[in-house]
Amino acid sequence: MAIRKLLLLLKPIDPYPFLQTEGASLIKNPQVLQYLESRCKVHKNAIKFCQEILSKKPVEWKPISRNDLSHPIRDVDMVITVGGDGTLLHASHFIDDSVPVLGVNSDPTQAHEVEELSDQFDASRSTGHLCAATVENFEQVLDDILFGRVVPAKVSRISLKLNSETLLSHALNDILIAHPCPAAVSRFSFKIKNKDGASSPKTVNCRSSGLRICTAAGSTAAMQSAGGFVMPMLSRDLQFMVREPISPGSTASLMHSTFKPDQFMDVNWYSDHGTIYIDGCQVQHSVQLGDTIEISSDAPVLNVFLSHGISQIRSRSESSSSTRNHTWIHIIFIMKDFSENA
């Protein structure tokens, strides 16, 4: 499909509004203030650069702040997000499987800066594992896409049913089901069932701080931080982990595993209150005593351009150009580690 109409979705131009008020006076370390001001400047310059590049291309485009996005994205051929992984995650909740998305990391972490300031504070910048481009290669990546030299990866998302009603939000990274108070104990049970009606022989009863389920894309985010394992990017499996179980006993080995696309997890909630957190704080749904939650990979995929595939097609194209007169190779993107946060 020819790409002629784009939506440019932007992380807020001023991500630290408190710097314009009394907030700046509360920061005692001048290096922290300098760092935050630098982040704002770099992000603004990245937005300006991307807009200038788009203005030279034979496409129609419109910018919008992610804070102003409130309806499903339709009538465009592609979405370009400028920010970090958090901006792309936010966009994913308004995109179905018909619109591909390209992420531009507007403010990548600088290794030397992190090292120099490690004794002062954490100087990490935007996480961009979901993002295939930065200002350094944006025009090249965009041209590859516009000329059809690359195709997006089909990345799995999580589908949820609450009391048999399908929720409209799909998780690209993960979901967490827990008590709204992080210090409270959550009581629930779950069982893995096959869609053909069969189920695992064991119901797992839990008292813990919650239950996390992630996609392959989200397996390098909170799941990995909690001790989970990284999954191949194109895997349709879902990984789950019971957080901080209390006296798990004989069911301990059943509290961290995966289930297949032809299976789903059936959760029964036994606490007075609970919350389903979808992709961190992107979307929340309340649950209460007696509610049931069904979790599967039945959600529409998200079509994402990933950096591993772009670098791979370039290297193959350069290799083949000497023998095939610049014949371009079409590939499907394979794997890029993901994590959360913008």
Image (cartoon, rainbow, N blue to C red):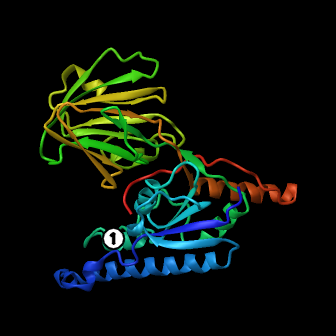
> In terms of depth relative to the viewer, which is nearer, 209 or 313?
209
Q: Quadrant of the N terminus?
A: bottom right
- Residue 32 visible in the picture: no
- x%, y% of residue 196? 46, 18
- From the viewer's perspective, is residue 243 above or below residue 192? below
Residue at figure coordinates x 12%, y 46% from the top left: 183
- From the viewer's perspective, is residue 160 above or below residue 108? above
Look at label 1 and name its amino acid: Ala
- Residue 14 visible in the picture: yes
How many numbered discs sit on the rendered protein? 1
> In terms of depth relative to the viewer, which is nearer, 160 or 138?
160
Q: Residues within 10 Å of mark 1 (few under 14, many from 20)?
A: some
Q: Is residue 287 left or right of residue 193?
A: left
> In terms of depth relative to the viewer, which is nearer, 301 or 72?
72
- x%, y% of residue 251? 24, 22
Read off the residue under disc 1: 123
- x%, y% of residue 312? 66, 54
Q: Is residue 223 left or right of residue 9?
A: left
Q: Secondary structure at mark 1?
A: loop
- x%, y% of residue 150? 68, 55
- From the viewer's perspective, is residue 140 above or below residue 287? below
Q: Quadrant of the C terminus?
A: bottom left
Residue at figure coordinates x 44%, y 76% from the top left: 43
Residue at figure coordinates x 41%, y 15% from the top left: 198
